[in-house]
Amino acid sequence: MKNRAPCPGARRTFGAVVQGLREHHGLSREELGDVVGFSKHTVASVELGRRMPDEEFVEAAEGALGNTGALRRAAGFVERQAGLATWFQRWARLEATAITLYVYESRMIPGLLQTEAYARHLFTEKLPPLTDEQIEANWAARAKRQLLLQERPNTKFGFVLEEHALRRRTGGAEVARGAIDHLLAMSDPRNLDIQIMPMVCESHPGLGGPLQLLETPNHKWYAYCEGQRGGLLVSEPKEVSILHMRYARMLSQALRPDDSRSLLRQIRGDL
């Protein structure tokens, strides 16, 4: 499905609706923030169109400002992001403000850690084929998402990657070497850990497929699981807890970050 770009000024329009309703109810930004569980600075950023409103903010503000449905409807025009699959966009909005993000990937290097050459190879090989314009839009969206790793130094990022996915030589030896060099460079920040699940591992809880976990600024946890033609965002606490348990077990089975870097250097040398 082709993604539509956001309507021009959609964030500013949404922010103006929030501000208008807030002022109608006689609330300051700080007072609204107290009610919805966000800081006054977050409220200001949303009202000024600087921040994408996440689902928690929309739902809390909707309840605090009369439950008219106006904010939910207005948010629908902000949500569409070119270059992101329709089923992924809700997760991407949560991801943008997460204070903790954990990723287990068994098929490939995850999008947040991909080089441009690696990502473009994936886009080029996609079926049905993408147009040049779609490939450019996909890369632009991925590059924008990757800014999270540089712009959120207080967010904890953790990645568990399967060794076999790194040895596949996706895109050819040169692309694969560049991808591993990038992983080695990205493993330096203190808020980002990369751990490798070794190929010789008789069993582990990730055999059911990739999964992601995140914690919102309000300390609510969500999970996301993706397949061939769609993704599932999980918000039910019991289900998130099960996936959290599985990820925790995988962390104990994967190589430590230092040992993972050593293995990455070894894999690169074998290419």
Image (cartoon, helix red, strand yellow):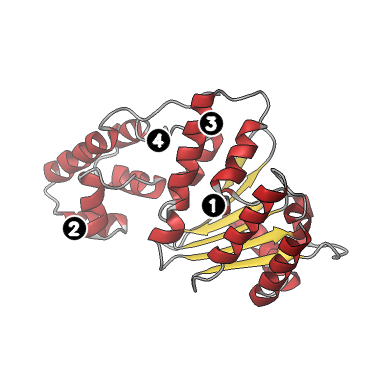
Q: Looking at the image, which residue is at 71% across and 61% down?
A: 268
Mark 4: which secondary structure?
A: loop
Mark 1: which secondary structure?
A: helix
Query: Is residue 221 found left or right of 63 in the rendered image?
Result: right
Tell me the residue that label 2 is attached to.
31
Report the disc number at residue 135: 3
Q: Earlier in the sequence, mark 1 or mark 3?
A: 1
Camera-near label (1 vs 4) is 1
Q: Closest to the observer: 17 or 174?
A: 174
Image: 253 above or below 62: below
Q: Earlier in the sequence, mark 2 or mark 4?
A: 2
Q: Amino acid at mark 2?
A: Glu
Query: Is residue 253 found left or right of 26 in the rendered image?
Result: right
10 Å neighbourhood of mark 2: few (<14), some, or many (≥20)?
A: some
User: Marks 1 and 3, how far apart in space?
Assistant: 17 Å
Tell me the residue that label 4 is attached to.
79
User: Marks 3 and 4, how far apart in space?
Assistant: 20 Å
